[in-house]
Image: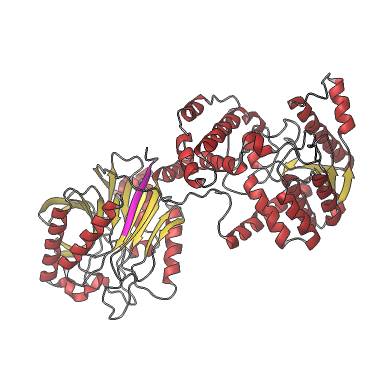
C-alpha cells in the first residue's frame, strides 16, 4: 500500500544558453536519474530548453526552431517514461511568443501553460519578447510534430488512477503577484502546484522565496514544487542560484543548496491524503459562478508510480517543535494562553481563590504554575491560590515533598488533607475489602479528592482548577466525576509530551533557582496516579505508562488520527518510521490497539468536559474540535488493526 505518498523531483540541469541540444541532453540525464530514484513528477526550470537569459535572441527563428527540434528529441526519448515531466520553453502561437511550461507524459505533450504575469521592472524585460497568457482561454496549437496540443493558463492535470492528484502550474513571477494563479488552481481542486522559475539571486531573496512558498502552500493547502535556473545562465548582469524548494501545506520538506555546478536534483515525498484531509476539514466555501467563469480545463491521464525508498521525516513528537528556539517560543505562547484564559475566567466569575490539588506530578505542577501566572496578571496575592495536597494510599515521599516544597517556595496557601481515613470509611460503607486493590479502590480515592476540592471552593468562594491533560482525556485515563471534573481545566488541550516541555520552559525561564530545582525533579519523576501502595522501598509502584502504554506513542496516534483522519494502517506505518530505533513493531501495534479501544469506549468522559482553553491544533472538547457520539461502534477501526502484522 502506498498510503497516498508521492515522490517528486525538482531539477536544475546544467545548460548552455541557446544550445538547445546540449540542454535537452542534460534534461534527459536528470530524467534518467530521477526515474531511478522513483520520482513520479519531475520539474525543470523556466525556459530550460533555451536558457532564460537569451534576451533578443528569443526573436530569432533559428533559436525557436532549434528549441522545437530539441523538444521532438525529448518526446522521442521519453516515450516509455512513466513520469510526468514539466519543462520550460518559448513557443510561437498565432504570431505571439509565449513563455510556457510544457507538460509531457510518455512522449506526448499533454498541454502547455503560458506565463500569466511578465515582470518588466528592474532587471526584467520579459514584455519585450513575450505575451501574457493571463486571459488565454482554451486554444490548441501544433508543436513538435504533435497536433492540437491544448494551451491555456487554465489547464489542470489529473491522474485518474491516483487519488487526490491534481496538478496546476504557475511560472516564476506568477507567484509574486497579488493574486497568484495557484490560488484559483487550488479552488479548482489542485493539490500539487509546480513553479518552473528563473529567479536571480540577490541579498534577501532566498528568505523571501521561503516566505512566499510557505504562505502560498499553506493558503492553498497544497504541495508546492519550485525550481529555478542554474548558475549556467548568463551572468552579464545577474546571477542565478538553482534554488529548489518543496513545500507541503506551509512546511518546507526539502531544500537544495545554492549554486550547484552540475545537474542537481532535489527530492521530496509528499502526502496527498494529508492535503485532501486538510481541505475537507477546512471546508472553505467559494462561488461556483466565479469558478465556472474561469473555464478551467482538466487534462486526464494515468500516472504509473514506481517504488521508492520512504525517507520522509516523520516527527515522533508532532506536538513539540524540534527547533529549540521555536520550542521556547511555542511554550511561552501556550503558557500565556493558559494563564490569560484562566485569568479572564476568574475575573468574570469574581472568584476569590484558585483551588487545585497538588500531587507533585507533572499535570498538577503545570496547573499550579499557570495559577501563579494568572494571579500575577490579575494582581491577586499568591495566597489566593489554595494548593491542596491530599496524601492517600499510594503517595510517596518524593511526590509529597515536591508538592509541599513547591507550594511553599511559590508562596501559595498550602492545605494538607489526608484522604486515607475518609477513603477507608467510604470503602467500608460500601462493603469493599481494603485488600482488594481494584478500580473501586482506586477511583474512591480520586472522587474523595475531587469532593474535597469542590467543597473547599465553596468555602473560599473559589474555582476548582482542573489538572488533567489531553493525552489522559484521549485514553479516558481519568476517574469519571473524579479528577475528570473541575470548574476550569487549564491543561485539557495539552498532550503529555508537551506538558514536560512547558514545565521545563517555566523552570528555566520564569522561575527562581530553588523552584527550578524542584521542577526538574518533578520532570524526572515517573508518571503515576499513586493510587496503589508504594513498593517495599517506598517508591512508586504504579506507573501509568506500564499500564496504558508510552504517552509518546499515544500522542503520536492521537495527532495523526484527529488532525488528518488517517486510518490505523497508515498510522501504524508512520509510527514504524518515526520510532524505528525506539520500539519494535509488536510494541507499536500493541499500544495502537489499546489506543483505539480506549479512545472509542471512553468518549463519554469527553462528552461532558469542563471548560478549558484550546492551545493547539487538536482539542477533544465537545464544544471545540471533537464531536463524537459516546456510543459509537469502533468495529471497523479495530477490525483493520487486527489484520495488521507486527
Residue 111 vs 570, above or below: the answer is below
> Residue 344 location in percent, x, y?
74, 50
State the residue lying farthest toward the bottom.
236
| 289 relative position to 133: left or right | right
- Magenta span main SS: strand
Pick the residue in front: 259 or 534. Answer: 534
- Residue 453 among magenta residues: no
- Residue 8 among magenta residues: yes
Which residue lies at the image location 72% right of the left edge and 53% below the top edge? 339
| 371 relative position to 544: left or right | right
> Residue 503 location in percent, x, y?
70, 53
Residue 27 seen anywhere in this rendered image of the structure = yes
Please provide the residue range marked out in magenta.
Answer: 4-10
Q: How many marks?
A: 0
| 362 relative position to 319: left or right | right
Which residue lies at the image location 52% right of the left edge and 38% below the top edge? 561
Give the image quarter of residue 382: bottom right
Residue 216 vs 358, above or below: the answer is below
> Residue 138 location in percent, x, y?
22, 51
The quarter of the picture where the N terminus appears is: top left
Color scheme of the displayed model? secondary structure
> Residue 495 location in percent, x, y?
63, 45
State the residue lying farthest toward the top.
431
Give the image quarter of residue 65: bottom left
Which residue lies at the image location 65% right of the left edge and 45% below the top edge? 496
Which residue lies at the image location 82% right of the left edge and 32% below the top edge? 448
Residue 351 seen anywhere in this rendered image of the structure = no
| 369 relative position to 57: left or right | right
Residue 21 vs 380, above or below: the answer is below
Amino acid at each position: 500500500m502506498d498510503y497516498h505518498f508521492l515522490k517528486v523531483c525538482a531539477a536544475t540541469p546544467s545548460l548552455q544558453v541557446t544550445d538547445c541540444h546540449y540542454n535537452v541532453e542534460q534534461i534527459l540525464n536528470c530524467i534518467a536519474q530521477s526515474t531511478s530514484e522513483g520520482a513520479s513528477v519531475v520539474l525543470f526550470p523556466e525556459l530550460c530548453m533555451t536558457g532564460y537569459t537569451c534576451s533578443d535572441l528569443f526573436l530569432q527563428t533559428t533559436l525557436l526552431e532549434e528549441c522545437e527540434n530539441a523538444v521532438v528529441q525529448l518526446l522521442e526519448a521519453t516515450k516509455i517514461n512513466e513520469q510526468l515531466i514539466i519543462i520550460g520553453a518559448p513557443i510561437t502561437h498565432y504570431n505571439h511568443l509565449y513563455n510556457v511550461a510544457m507538460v509531457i507524459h510518455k512522449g506526448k505533450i499533454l498541454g502547455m501553460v503560458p506565463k500569466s504575469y511578465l515582470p518588466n521592472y528592474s532587471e526584467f524585460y520579459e514584455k519585450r519578447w513575450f505575451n501574457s497568457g493571463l486571459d488565454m482561454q482554451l486554444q490548441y496549437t501544433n508543436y513538435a510534430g504533435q497536433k492540437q496540443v491544448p494551451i491555456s493558463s487554465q489547464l489542470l492535470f489529473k491522474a485518474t488512477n491516483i487519488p487526490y492528484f491534481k496538478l496546476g502550474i504557475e511560472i516564476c513571477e506568477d507567484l509574486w503577484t497579488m493574486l497568484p494563479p495557484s490560488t484559483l488552481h487550488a479552488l479548482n481542486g489542485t493539490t500539487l502546484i509546480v513553479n518552473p522559475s528563473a529567479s536571480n539571486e540577490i541579498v534577501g531573496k532566498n528568505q523571501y522565496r521561503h516566505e512566499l512558498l510557505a504562505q502560498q502552500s499553506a493558503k492553498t493547502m497544497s504541495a508546492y514544487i519550485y525550481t529555478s535556473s542554474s548558475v549556467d545562465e548568463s551572468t552579464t548582469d545577474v546571477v542565478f542560484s538553482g534554488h529548489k524548494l518543496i513545500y507541503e501545506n506551509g512546511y518546507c520538506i526539502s531544500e537544495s543548496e545554492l549554486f550547484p555546478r552540475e545537474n542537481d536534483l532535489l527530492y521530496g515525498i509528499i502526502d496527498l491524503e494529508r492535503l485532501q484531509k486538510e481541505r475537507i476539514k477546512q471546508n472553505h466555501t467559494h462561488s461556483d459562478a466565479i469558478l465556472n467563469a474561469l473555464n478551467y480545463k482538466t487534462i486526464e491521464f494515468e500516472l504509473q508510480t514506481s517504488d521508492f525508498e520512504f525517507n520522509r521525516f516523520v516527527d515522533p513528537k508532532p506536538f513539540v517543535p524540534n527547533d529549540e528556539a521555536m520550542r521556547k517560543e511555542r511554550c511561552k505562547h501556550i503558557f500565556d494562553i493558559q494563564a490569560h484564559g484562566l485569568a479572564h475566567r476568574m475575573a468574570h466569575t469574581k472568584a476569590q481563590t484558585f483551588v487545585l490539588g497538588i500531587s507533585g506530578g507533572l499535570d498538577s505542577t503545570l496547573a499550579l504554575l499557570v495559577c501563579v501566572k494568572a494571579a500575577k496578571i490579575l494582581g491577586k496575592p499568591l495566597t489566593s491560590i489554595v494548593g491542596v495536597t491530599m496524601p492517600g494510599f499510594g503517595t510517596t515521599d518524593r511526590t509529597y515533598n515536591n508538592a509541599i516544597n513547591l507550594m511553599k517556595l511559590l508562596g501559595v496557601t498550602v492545605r494538607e488533607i489526608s484522604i486515607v481515613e475518609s477513603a477507608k470509611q467510604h470503602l467500608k460503607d460500601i462493603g469493599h475489602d481494603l485488600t482488594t486493590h481494584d478500580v473501586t479502590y482506586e477511583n474512591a480515592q480520586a472522587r474523595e479528592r475531587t469532593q474535597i476540592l469542590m467543597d473547599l471552593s465553596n468555602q473560599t468562594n473559589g474555582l476548582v482548577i482542573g489538572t488533567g491533560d489531553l493525552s489522559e482525556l484521549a485514553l479516558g485515563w481519568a476517574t469519571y466525576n473524579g479528577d475528570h471534573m473541575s470548574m476550569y481545566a487549564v491543561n485539557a488541550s495539552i498532550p503529555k509530551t508537551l506538558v514536560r516541555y512547558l514545565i521545563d520552559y517555566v523552570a528555566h525561564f520564569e522561575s527562581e533557582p530553588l523552584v527550578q530545582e524542584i521542577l526538574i525533579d518533578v520532570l524526572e519523576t515517573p508518571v503515576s496516579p499513586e493510587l496503589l501502595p508504594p513498593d517495599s522501598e517506598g517508591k512508586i509502584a504504579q506507573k501509568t505508562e506500564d499500564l496504558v502504554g508510552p504517552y509518546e506513542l499515544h500522542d503520536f496516534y492521537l495527532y495523526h488520527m484527529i488532525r488528518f483522519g488517517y486510518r490505523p494502517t497508515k498510522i501504524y506505518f508512520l509510527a514504524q518510521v518515526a520510532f524505528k530505533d525506539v520500539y519494535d513493531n509488536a510494541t507499536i501495534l500493541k499500544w495502537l490497539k489499546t489506543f483505539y479501544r480506549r479512545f472509542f469506549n471512553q468518549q463519554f468522559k469527553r462528552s461532558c468536559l469542563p471548560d478549558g482553553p484550546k492551545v493547539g491544533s487538536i482539542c477533544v472538547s465537545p464544544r471545540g474540535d471533537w464531536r463524537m457520539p459516546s456510543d459509537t461502534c469502533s468495529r471497523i477501526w479495530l477490525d483493520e488493526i487486527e489484520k495488521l502484522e507486527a
